[in-house]
Image: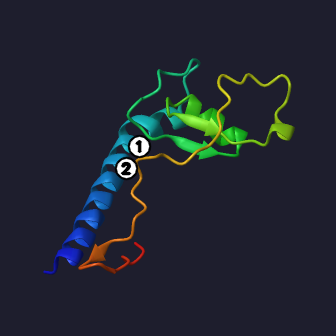
């Protein structure tokens, strides 16, 4: 198995394991709260990535399920009565590797997965 193929295999394995972990968390924690929302939202689970959404209905449902959620809106569409806890500017994280994989100085892009 060439090293390049091993890297692709490990990345796909990590992705599948994270998908399984997320699905189990959803089944155990989120789904019951979406079906029967509490009167007060539970504390947010800080290890979950959360959700970016443009839908106020999705935002409210996930908020009452304890999922970190960001309502993405243009400033023109924000109601003056809306309770905005923190206004943030979306940025790209600095620690994401964007370099092309190379072997012996030759760029070899990975297939999209």
Q: Quadrant of residue 46?
A: top left
Name the residue: 22% across, 65% down.
10
Q: Position of residue 64 (x, y in %)?
A: 56, 28
Q: Residue at x 46, y 46 (%)?
A: 94
Q: Residue furthest top?
A: 40
Residue 73 lies left or right of residue 47; in this view the side is right
Q: Nearer the viewer, residue 101 or 8?
A: 101
At mark 2, the secondary structure is helix
In which quadrant is the N terminus drawn? bottom left
- Residue 43 percent coordinates (x, y): 47, 21
Give the residue displayed 19% in from the left and 72% down from the top: 6
On the image, which quarter does residue 11 sit in? bottom left
Q: Residue at the far left: name it.
A: 1
How would you rate the neighbour count of disc 1 (Cα within 10 Å): few for under 14, some for 14-19, many for 20 or more? some
Determine which of the numbered discs, if any, sits on residue 26 in the image. Answer: 1
Q: Disc 2 marks which residue?
A: 23
Residue 47: x and y in percent read 38, 34
Depth check: give the residue in front, 17 or 29. 17
Is the residue 97 above or below the residue 77 in the image? below
Question: What is the x, y in percent for residue 95?
Answer: 40, 47
In the displayed structure image, the side of residue 87 where residue 97 appears, left or right? left
Above or below — where is 12 with respect to 107? Answer: above
User: Which image quadrant: the C terminus?
Assistant: bottom left
Q: What separation in Å lies between label 2 and label 1 (alpha carbons)?
A: 5 Å
SS at circle 1: helix
Give the tally of numbered discs.
2
Q: Quadrant of residue 37?
A: top right
Side (left or right) of 86 relative to 98: right
The answer to which of 32 and 43 lies nearer the viewer is 43
Mark 2 touching mark 1, by CB under 8 A?
A: yes
| 13 relative to 59, above or below | below
Q: How many residues crowd around disc 2 within 10 Å: few (fewer than 14), some, or many (20 or more)?
A: few
């Amino acid at each position: 198995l060439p090293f390049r193929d091993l890297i692709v295999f490990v990345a796909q394995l990590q992705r599948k394991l994270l998908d399984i972990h997320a699905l189990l968390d959803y089944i155990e924690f989120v789904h019951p709260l979406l079906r029967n929302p509490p009167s007060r939202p539970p504390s947010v689970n800080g290890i979950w990535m959360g959700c970016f959404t443009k839908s106020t209905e999705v935002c409210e449902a996930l908020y009452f399920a304890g999922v970190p959620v960001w309502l993405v809106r243009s400033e023109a569409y924000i109601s003056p009565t809306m309770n905005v806890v923190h206004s943030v500017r979306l940025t790209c994280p600095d620690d994401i590797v964007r370099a092309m994989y190379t072997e012996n100085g030759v760029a070899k892009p990975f297939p999209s997965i």
